Image: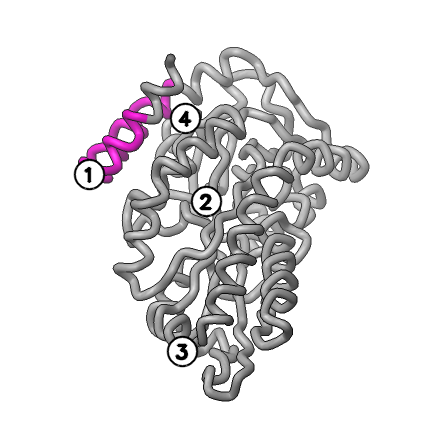
C-alpha cells in the first residue's frame, strides 16, 4: 500500500553535496502542521546555504497511521504525523491526546517536555529521528446540529482521530469511528457521520463548515504531530546538513508553541466568517458526560502504556496540582 500511494523522492546521496528530501503530511498546507512544515523547510534550506532542500508534501494521500512505517521502510525520507494515529505502534504516542489531561497550552507543553525522552526512544526504535513537534489547537466537536444537552450527544455519529477518542465517544454517542482526515470527506458526503472531533484548525483547513455548521469548544485535548527523518537518510548527510536540519527543527518547535495562542482566535474568526456557530461554553451536562467517559478511558490507557508512561503522566499531574 505504501509504495502504491507514494511515488515520492527519498533524496539524493550526501556525496553529491546537495540533498533533496520530501516531507509528507496528511493535512493540507493551510493546517497548522502544514505551515510548520513550510517554515521548517525554509529554515533548513537557508541554514544549509541551499545544500539541503526540504520539499513539503501536504495532502500526501497517505493516512497518518501508515507514515511511521513509510519512513522506517525507506519509502519516504521524512513525515509529519499526528501522534494519536499511532496507537498500534505504541500507546505512548496517544499521551498528548488524552482527554482533558492538558487544559492549557502551558500544560500541554509541560507534558510534552516530560514525555520527550520516551518519544525520542520510540522513534529511534523505528529507525528514525524525532525532529520537531507541532501542537494543535484544542480539539472540539463539529456537528450538524447544536449540542445543547447531553441527550444531543446520543445522536452523534462522530469521527475521532485516535483510539482513546473513539472509546470516549463510544460511551456517549450513537456511533464513534476512527478515521484519518484523508478519509473524511467521502464519509461526510455520504452522510455516514454527522460530527467530527477536531480542532478548528484541521477542520478549517478541510472546510468542514460545508457539512457541519456548529462547533462546541469542549477543550478535549491539545494533540501533537511529530516530524521525523529516516536514520539511514540522516546518516547519509554531512555534519553541516545535520546541523542545519537540527537547528531548523529546534526553531520550528519553538515557533509552533509560541504561535498556538493566536492560532485559536484566527481559526474561530475564519470559522465564523464561513457561517459556523461556535459554542465557547458548552452546557455543564455535556461536559460532565464527556469527563466521566474520559476518566475510565485514561485509566485503561495508563494500563496499556506501561510503567514509564505512567510515571511521566503521574509526575506531570503531581506538578500541575501544586
User: Looking at the image, is mark 2 or mark 1 earlier in the sequence?
Assistant: 2
Q: Which residues are magenta?
A: 292-315
Q: Choose between 5 and 31: the one closer to the eye.
A: 31
Q: Which residue appears at 63% of the width and 72% of the height?
A: 49
Give how far apart the Cα atoms at labels 1 and 4 are: 18 Å
Instruction: Using a 10 Å C-alpha cutoff, classify the residue at mark 3 as few (fewer than 14 neighbours), some (14 to 19) or many (20 or more).
Output: some
Q: Would you name the residue on which mark 4 appears?
A: 101
Between marks 1 and 3 in the image, the one whose residue lies nearer the viewer: 3
Q: Which mark is residue 161?
A: 2
Q: Would you name the residue on which mark 1 appears?
A: 306
User: Looking at the image, is mark 3 or mark 2 earlier in the sequence?
Assistant: 2
Quadrant that contains the C terminus: top left
Q: Are marks 1 and 4 in contact (CB under 8 Å)?
A: no
Between marks 3 and 2 in the image, the one whose residue lies nearer the viewer: 3
Q: Is residue 41 left or right of residue 129?
A: right
User: Looking at the image, is mark 1 or mark 4 earlier in the sequence?
Assistant: 4
Give how far apart the Cα atoms at labels 2 and 1 are: 22 Å
Give how far apart the Cα atoms at labels 3 and 2 are: 34 Å
Mark 1 lies on a secondary structure that is loop
Q: Are marks 3 and 2 in contact (CB under 8 Å)?
A: no
Amino acid at each position: 500500500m505504501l509504495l502504491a500511494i507514494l511515488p515520492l523522492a527519498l533524496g539524493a546521496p550526501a556525496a553529491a553535496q546537495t540533498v533533496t528530501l520530501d516531507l509528507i503530511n496528511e493535512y493540507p498546507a493551510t493546517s497548522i502542521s502544514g505551515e510548520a512544515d513550510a517554515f521548517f523547510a525554509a529554515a533548513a534550506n537557508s541554514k544549509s546555504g541551499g545544500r539541503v532542500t526540504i520539499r513539503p508534501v501536504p495532502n500526501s494521500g497517505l493516512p497518518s497511521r501508515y507514515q511511521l512505517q513509510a519512513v522506517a521502510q525507506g519509502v519516504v525520507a521524512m513525515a509529519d504525523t499526528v501522534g494519536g494515529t499511532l496507537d498500534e505502534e505504541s500507546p505512548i504516542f496517544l499521551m498528548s491526546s488524552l482527554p482533558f489531561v492538558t487544559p492549557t497550552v502551558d500544560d500541554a507543553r509541560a507534558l510534552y517536555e516530560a514525555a520527550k525522552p520516551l518519544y525520542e526512544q520510540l522513534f529511534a526504535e523505528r529507525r528514525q529521528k524525532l525532529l520537531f513537534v507541532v501542537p494543535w489547537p484544542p480539539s472540539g466537536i463539529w456537528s450538524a446540529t447544536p449540542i445543547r444537552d447531553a441527550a444531543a450527544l446520543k445522536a452523534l455519529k462522530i469521527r475521532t482521530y485516535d483510539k482513546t477518542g473513539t472509546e470516549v465517544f463510544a460511551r456517549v454517542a450513537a456511533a464513534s469511528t476512527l478515521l484519518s482526515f484523508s478519509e473524511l470527506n467521502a464519509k461526510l458526503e455520504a452522510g455516514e457521520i454527522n460530527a467530527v472531533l477536531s480542532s478548528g484548525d484541521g477542520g478549517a483547513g478541510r472546510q468542514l463548515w460545508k457539512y457541519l455548521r456548529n462547533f462546541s469548544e469542549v477543550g478535549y485535548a491539545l494533540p501533537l504531530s511529530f516530524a521525523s527523518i529516516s536514520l539511514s537518510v540522516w546518516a547519509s548527510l554531512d555534519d553541516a546538513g545535520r546541523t542545519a536540519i537540527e537547528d531548523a527543527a529546534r526553531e520550528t518547535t519553538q515557533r509552533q508553541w509560541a504561535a498556538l495562542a493566536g492560532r485559536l482566535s484566527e481559526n474561530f474568526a475564519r470559522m465564523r466568517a464561513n457561517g459556523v456557530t461556535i459554542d465557547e461554553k458548552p452546557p455543564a451536562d455535556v461536559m460532565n458526560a464527556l469527563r466521566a467517559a474520559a476518566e475510565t478511558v485514561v485509566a485503561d490507557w495508563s494500563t496499556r502504556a506501561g510503567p514509564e508512561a505512567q510515571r511521566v503522566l503521574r509526575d506531570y499531574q503531581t506538578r500541575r496540582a501544586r
